[in-house]
Amino acid sequence: MQTLKSSSIFSSFRLLKPNSFIVIQYFSASSVTAAPNPPLFNYLVKDLNFDEIQAFSISNRFRKVKSLEKTQSAVNFLQSLGFSNAQIASSARLAPQILFADVENVLRPKIKFFQDLGLMEPHIPKFFSMNSTLLTCSLDKKLIPSVQLLKKALGNNNEDLFKVFSRCNGFIARDSILKLSRNIEYLESCGIVGSQLSMLLRRQPRIFRLRESTLRNLVSWALDRGFSTDSRMLVHAIHTMNCLSEKTFKKKWELLKSCGFSENDCATMFRKAPGLFRVSEEKLKLGIEFFINAAKFNKDVVASHPFLLMYSLEDRVIPRYRVMQIIKSKRLLKKDRSFLYILDQTEIEFLEFISRFTDDVEELLIAYKAHLFPTSSSSEEAT
């Protein structure tokens, strides 16, 4: 085995697998002739500005490629679509074989397929630099049937289809159509259909890539904790548990208990708002402290309205609390409004509520948006 020695202290090393043996080889940019495919390596580095390690890896993988004609043709095609050298490098990092693909028979038809789905030309480079593995899939055997399956689950919404791809790199390309189909069918059998299914697919496409046995275990876990296939919260429980490890989930549970909530309280909070357990520990602590100590809510109220802890303290809870304190101090309301009711209002509804107090509306708006204005100390620092 020949070891490539570096003449520079800044040389890089990489694990390679020639002839199935893992070796550590040192690579030097000053020794182009040491690359397995010098012409290809030289083209990638000098013409496309690939970093030497990536270029070396590609030239090693495609060492038998003698002509650069097909590679140059593929690159010219990508550049004609607006790909920068950096985006070509990103695409090749995920799927280097696209550099050797036939333009007319492979690349152009697949890109046209996505254009027909609504992918606008200015967005093509960014989309495929993150999803270049799609260009390695068979159009007829993989892309078309998979996309049809996804579109059906998404209600034929092409915009949502591209959101799914953006959230899950390699989606479809690395998964079988059968797995995708079976997972969709299983979730539908659990009552997760229509808008709930499309929501889960948009937010957590990785769930649809799970082994069917893993997905079944995830659903069973949720059912064991009080959810049912009739509950609209089941999909949110599955979403949450797919985002968290069991250790993290237990840690959040113990945090709630340490704040004075009982086991039954924790179970109730999870069933009513599974997404609560995706909230950071810091936000949970601050929220509980505010509602119990500042807003003087009873723990039972917080336990029965766990969504309170999911609201933004800075942008929603505290600003509205300030406004209500002013309204109460000035006795502007003939009948008290529940702070729960106030928090549940949309932004438009709350602003309409404030606008009723015409004589005090300016003061109330300033109190509501105070967090958006720089403090005097920060203004002084800026000057």
Image (cartoon, rainbow, N blue to C red):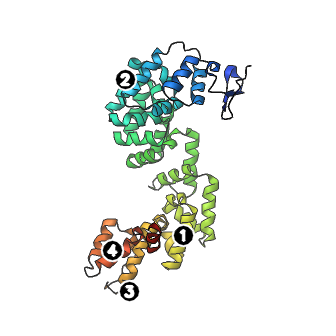
**Residue located beneath label 3 in the image:** 329
Viewer-side label of 2, 4: 4
Instruction: Kindly report the distance in space between the C-alpha atoms of the residues bearing marks 3 and 1.
Output: 25 Å
- Placement of the N terminus among the 4 image quadrants: top right
User: Along the line of sight, which residue is nearer the eye, 360 or 270?
Assistant: 360
Residues tagged 3 and 1 counted as in contact (Cβ below 8 A): no
What percent of the width, then of the height, locates residue 145? 41, 29
Q: What's under tag 2, amino acid-wise?
A: Pro
Instruction: Kindly report the distance in space between the C-alpha atoms of the residues bearing marks 2 and 1.
Output: 54 Å
**Extreme-front residue of the structure:** 383
Q: Which of the numbered marks, if any, corresponds to residue 109?
A: 2
Viewer-side label of 4, 3: 4
Viewer-side label of 4, 1: 4
First of labels 4, 1 by sequence position: 1
Q: Is residue 325 visible?
A: yes
Residues tagged 4 and 1 counted as in contact (Cβ below 8 A): no
Q: Is residue 119 visible?
A: no
Q: Residue at horizontal 45%, vertical 68%?
A: 314
Residues tagged 4 and 3 counted as in contact (Cβ below 8 A): no
Query: Secondary structure under badge 1?
Result: helix
User: Along the line of sight, which residue is nearer the eye, 25 or 194?
Assistant: 25
Figure quadrant of residue 58:
top right
First of labels 4, 3 by sequence position: 3
What percent of the width, then of the height, locates residue 330? 34, 87
Query: Secondary structure under badge 4?
Result: helix
Q: Residue at horizontal 58%, vertical 14%?
A: 64
Figure quadrant of residue 66:
top right
What percent of the width, then of the height, locates residue 261? 59, 71
**Residue located beneath label 1 in the image:** 286
First of labels 3, 1 by sequence position: 1
**Residue located beneath label 4 in the image:** 365
